[in-house]
Image (cartoon, grey):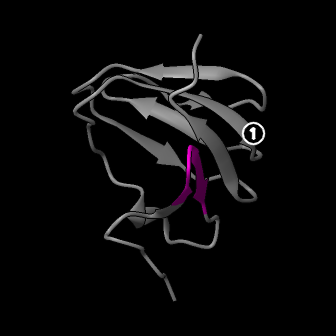
Amino acid sequence: MVVVISGKPYTDSDDIRMFNVGDDQKEFVWHRDKEDRIFEVLEGEAWQLQYNGSIPILLEEEKTYYIPKMMYHRLIKGYNNLKVKINVKF
């Protein structure tokens, strides 16, 4: 059973966002954000980020990623939960 909080496949606690590997992959839909997004991967194995028109890239722990505002993108789930810190500085 998939539990989605506020219609989103993640939970937030301050600037930490957690994606549950138990959620159905169809919950990780193509979407775009109204603001630039910078995030650091704290935990998570084999998760991928895919930008529209590009092949997926493997997310690595302790690395920072940038998503430009209004860029369609999606997550592809990995082997365990993904934990990221949102809006970190480069």
- Measured as percent of width and height from the top left, residue 67 is found at 41, 23
Residue found farthest to the front: 14
Query: Image point 27% across, 24% down: which residue?
Result: 69
The structure residue drawn at horizontal position 33% and vertical position 71%, both measured from the top left corner, is 6
Query: Relative to residue 69, is residue 77 drawn left or right?
Result: right
Q: Give the range drawn in magenta.
A: 12-19
Looking at the rendering, which quadrant does residue 23 occupy? bottom right
Where residue 90 sits in the image (x, y, percent)?
59, 10
Picture coordinates of residue 87 (x, y %)? 50, 28
Q: Position of residue 50 (x, y in %)?
A: 45, 33
Q: In the shown orientation, is residue 72 left or right of residue 16?
A: left
State whether the magenta stretch is mostly helix, strand or loop: strand
Magenta-colored stretch includes residue 15 = yes
Residue at point 70%, 59% (across, down): 81
Q: Judge from the rendering whether residue 80 lies leftward or rightward of residue 84; answer left or right.
A: right
For disc 1, the marked residue is 42
Please say whether residue 86 is one of the residues in the magenta stretch.
no
